[in-house]
Image (cartoon, rainbow, N blue to C red):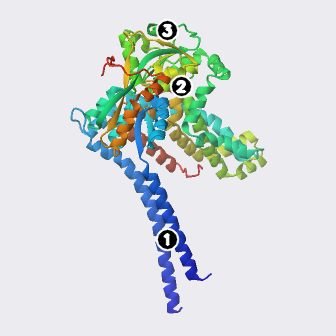
Amino acid sequence: MSSTRRIVIITLVCVAAGAALLFVLRTANAATTLLVHAGAGIRPPLDELGTAFAKKTGIRVDYAYKGSGCLLADICFSKRGDVYIPGEVYYVEQAEKRGFVSSRKVVAQMSTVLIVQKGNPKNIRGVRDLTRPGLRVGIGDPKAIAAGRAANEVLVRAGVLDAVQKNIAMTALNVVELGIGVKLKHLDAAIVWDATAHLVRDEVETLEIPEAWRVDSPIPVAVLTFSKHRRDAERFVDFLASKQAREVFVKHGYGPPTKDTKQAARP
Amino acid sequence: MSVDGVRQVARRDLGNRLFSAVLGSVLVLFLSLILLLLASNVIYLSQSRGPEGQTGWQLLLAAVRNPENLFAVRLSVATASITVLLALVIGLPAAYVLSRYRLPGSGVIDTVLDLPIVLPPPVIGISLLIFFQTPAGRWVDHITPQWAVATSNKVLSLLSGHAIEDALEWTYTTRGIIVAQFFVACSFGVRAIKAAFDTIGTRHEEVARTLGCTKRQAFFRVVLPMASAGIVAGTIMTWARAIAEFGPVLFFSGATRWKTAVLPVAMFLSFSAGDIEGAVALVLIMVAISAVTLLTFKKLGGRGYLW
C-alpha cells in the first residue's frame, strides 16, 4: 500500500469517526436531563415517577439522593441542579431564604409513626412506653435529618424527651436505617415516617401516634433558580403534583397533602 | 566524531531531557492538585464569617475547642489504637505464616485476605449488621459476659472523656466501632507486616537454627528484632487506616453524637446539619493527624511497599 493511499484511508476513517461522535453527542444532548436533589427517604415513589415522567415526555430525570440537610449544603456549594425535593418544608424555606427557589408545590405528606419488631415482643403500646428501662430505641439525628427533628418533636409533645434519651441506642443519618434496624431486630422501636414503615411493613409492626403528638410533614418540591431547564423542571413539578403521581405516592405509604398540617417546631 | 554524529547525540540528549521534563511535570501537576484540594479548605475557612461576625479562624478555634469535636478526636484515637493492638495480635502470626510457609491454595488465601481492603466500605458494615441478626450473631451477643461489657464501657469512657453506657448487644455500640474498623485494618496490617518479614529474608533465622535455636527462639530473638522497624511502620499505617474508617462504622455503629461519632462520622454529621465550618475544621484536624502519621511512618523507614 502506498503511503498516499494510507493517508487518504486514515483521513477518511478519522472524518467518519468524528462525524459519528458528533452525531452521538448531538442525540445525547437533544434530550434534556433534569438533576433533582432529593431526600433519600422519598426514593421509592420518586424512582417510579421519574421513569414514568421520562416515558411520557422524553425528559430524563437524574436523582441525587441524600439526607435533606446534606442536600442543602450540597446546593449551597455547587449551585447546580433543577429541582429540590427535601423531606420537609423547613429545608425549602432555607433554600428560599438564600434565593435558590423560583417556585414550589406540596405533592404529598408523611406522618410520624412508631415501629416495633414483628409480634411486638417487648409489648410496646405507644410513645410513652419508650421510657421503659432497657429498651433499644432509634431516632434520626435531630440536627441533621427531618425524621430526627420530627421524632424529637413527638417526644417533646408526649412529654418524654428526657426519659427516652437514655434508651436511644442509635441515631441515624438516614431514616431507612431505622426501619432496617428494627427489621433486623437490633432495635426494639423507632420513630419513623409512615412511608419508611411501609418499606419494611412485612417485617415490623406499625403503631399509630395519637394526633396530638403526631408530626405531619408535607413534601415540597421546588424549582431551583439556577436551573438551566426551567420549563422542563416546572413540567416535572406539575407532574409530581398530578393525580397520577398522587396515586403512586399513596401506593408507597404517603398521605395526600392536606392544608392544615401541624409543623414541627423549628430550633 | 562527525558533525552529524555530534548533532545526533545532542538531539538525543535534548529528547531525553524533554522526556524527563514531561514525566516530571505530570508528577508536579498531580502534587499541586492534591495541595490545591487541601488548601481550598483553608482558603474557604479564611474567607467565611460566623453568624456573630467571627472570622474563619475564630470559627476554627471554636470548632477545635468544641467538646463534641474533642470527643470525636479522643474517641477516634482510642478506637483506632485498640483496633491496631488487636490487628497486631492477629497480624503478626498470620503475616509470619504467610511470609515463611508455602501454603496450599495461597492464591485463594491472598484473595480472601485482601478482600476487606478492596471491597466498598459499606460491605463490611452491612455484613456486620446482617451477621449479628443470625443465630451465630445472637449467640455472640448472648455469650458476651457482663463484666467484659462493663470493662469496655469503662475503658472507652475514660479514653473518650464521656460516659459510655453500652448494652450487651454489639450493634450500634461504641465498642462496635472497633469491630467495624478491625476487618480492614487487620487485612492491611497483615499485608504490611508480611512485607517486613519478606524483606529480611530467611537466612538469619536459618543460621540461628543451625546454632541451636528453636523455632520459637529464632522468631523472638532474631526475626522479630530485625523486622521491628518494618513492623512498627506497618502498624502506624494500619492505625492511619483504622482512624480513617467511615463506611463500616456508619452502618454498624450508627452516627450517634457523644457515642459513635468518630472523626469521619462527626465530619458527616456536621456537614449534614449544615455546619460547614465545623466540618472543615474536622477535615483539617484529620489532615493533620494523617500527615503526622505518614511522616512518622517514613521516618521509621517505612516505604511504599504496602501493596
Taking A90 as reference, is B150 above or below it?
Answer: above
Q: Chain of mark 1?
A: B
Taking A219 as reference, is A155 above or below it?
Answer: above
Q: Is residue B292 left or right of residue A101?
A: right
Cα–Cα span, label 2 and label 3: 21 Å
Task: Give the residue type at disc 2.
Answer: Arg
Judge if badges 3 and 1 mark residues of a common chain. Answer: no
Taking A78 as reference, is A199 above or below it?
Answer: above
Judge if badges 1 and 2 mark residues of a common chain. Answer: yes
Around disc 3, counting alpha carbons within 10 Å, would you say few (fewer than 14), some (14 to 19), or many (20 or more)? few
Q: Secondary structure at mark 1?
A: helix
Judge if badges 2 and 3 mark residues of a common chain. Answer: no
Cα–Cα span, label 1 and label 2: 53 Å
Q: Which residue is mark 1?
A: B19
Of label 1 and label 2, which has the lower sequence position? Answer: 1
Q: Nearer the viewer, residue B223 or A161?
A: A161
Task: Give the residue type at disc 1.
Answer: Phe
Residue A168: in sight, yes or no? yes
Cα–Cα span, label 3 and label 1: 72 Å
Q: Chain of mark 2?
A: B
Whole-percent x and y of residue B151?
Answer: 54, 19
User: Are dots 1 and 2 in contact, CB under 8 Å?
Assistant: no
Q: Quadrant of the N terminus of chain B?
A: bottom right
Q: Which residue is mark 2?
A: B175
Q: Secondary structure at mark 3?
A: loop
Please identify the residue farthest to the left as the structure is shown: B53
Which mark, by number, is residue A163? none
Around disc 2, counting alpha carbons within 10 Å, would you say few (fewer than 14), some (14 to 19), or many (20 or more)? many
Which mark, by number, is residue A133? 3
